[in-house]
Amino acid sequence: MNWKLAAVAYATIVRKETTRFLRIWQQSLLPPVITTALYFIIFGHLIGPRIGEMDGHRYIDFIVPGLILMSVITNAYANVSSSLFSAKFQRAIEELQVSPTPNFVILLGYVSGGVARAILVGVIVTSVSLFFSRLSMHSYLVTASMVFLTAVLFALGGFLNGLFARKFDDISIVPTFILTPLTYLGGVFYSIKLLPALWQAVSHINPILYMINAFRYGFLGITDIGLGFSYGITALFIAALFFLNLKLLNAGFGIRR
C-alpha cells in the first residue's frame, strides 16, 4: 500500500468533512449551543436550587459535564451518519471505493470529521456553560481523553447507521429511539446512587453511563463507576464498532447495489 497516497486521501476526506459542517454552521454548531443553554437555564437556575446539592456539588455544576458530553455524542453521531448517507445517495462513496484509497482510510476520514465537529461543539458548549456555572478541572487528561474517545465511539456508531440507512428517515431512528433515551438515562441529570438497587444494576447495561461518569470525574473528581472500567468499556466498544464497520465496508454492505 502507498502510505503517502493514503495520507493524502485521509487529509482530503477530513478537509471535505470539516468544510461541510463549517459551511452550514447555523445548522451544525448553533442549535446544540442554544439547546444546552436552555438546559442550563431550566435545570440549572430554575430547578437546580430546589434540588440542592448532588454529590457535594451544586446541581448545575453536577449536570454541566453530562450536558457537554451529550452534545459531543449527538454531534459526532449525526455528522457521520448524515454525511455518509448523503455520499451514498449521491453515489460519491462509490467513487472513493473504486479509487486506490483503502477502506480503513475512508472510515478514519469520516470518523475524524465527526470527531472534529463533536469536539468543536463541546468547546463551544463548555464556553457557554461558564456563564452559568463555576466549572473546575480535576483532571485535564481524563477530560480530554474521554471526550475524544466518546466522540470516536459515536462517530463510528454514526458510520454504522449511515451504512444501514436506506432513506433519510432511517438516519433519525437510532438517535430518536435509542441514543436519546440512553443518554438521558446515562446519569446526565442524576447520580445512579439515587436509584434503587435493581435500577442501579439495570443502569450498568448502558454504555453511556461509563463515559459520562468518567467525564464528570475529569471536571469534579467524582464518579459512580471506576475509571479503569469506564475506559475499558469505551475502548471495547470502539474496537468492536471499528472492525464491524470495516468488515461491512469491505463487503460493500449498504453501498453496492
Image (tube, helix red, strand yellow):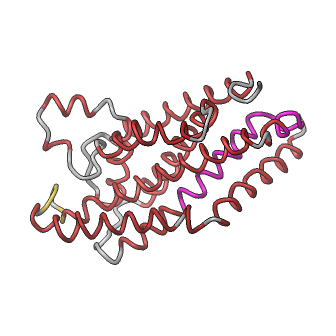
Instruction: Tell me the residue at 18%/69% (across/down).
Output: 46
Left or right of residue 63: residue 32 = right
Quarter where residue 57 is shown: bottom left
Given residues 31 and 192, the one toward you in this image is: 31
Residue 73 image offset from top left, x and y in percent: 46, 49
Is residue 247 part of the magenta span, yes or no?
no
User: For the image shown, how many numbered marks are present on the structure?
Assistant: 0
Is 229 located above or below residue 57 in the figure? above
Left or right of residue 102: residue 77 = left
Is 219 located above or below residue 41 in the figure? above
Given residues 232 and 52, the one toward you in this image is: 52
Residue 209 image offset from top left, x and y in percent: 33, 41
**In which quadrant is the N terminus drawn?**
top right
Residue 121 image offset from top left, x and y in percent: 51, 63
Instruction: Tell me the residue at 36%/71% (across/down).
Output: 129
The residue segment tinted magenta is 95-119
Quarter where residue 97 is shown: top right
Instruction: Tell me the residue at 48%/57% (across/down).
Output: 144
Is the stretch drawn in magenta largely helix, strand or loop? Answer: helix
Residue 208 image offset from top left, x and y in percent: 37, 41
Is 191 located above or below residue 21 in the figure? above
**In which quadrant is the C terminus drawn?**
top right
Q: Residue furthest bottom?
A: 131
Is 167 located above or below residue 146 in the figure? above
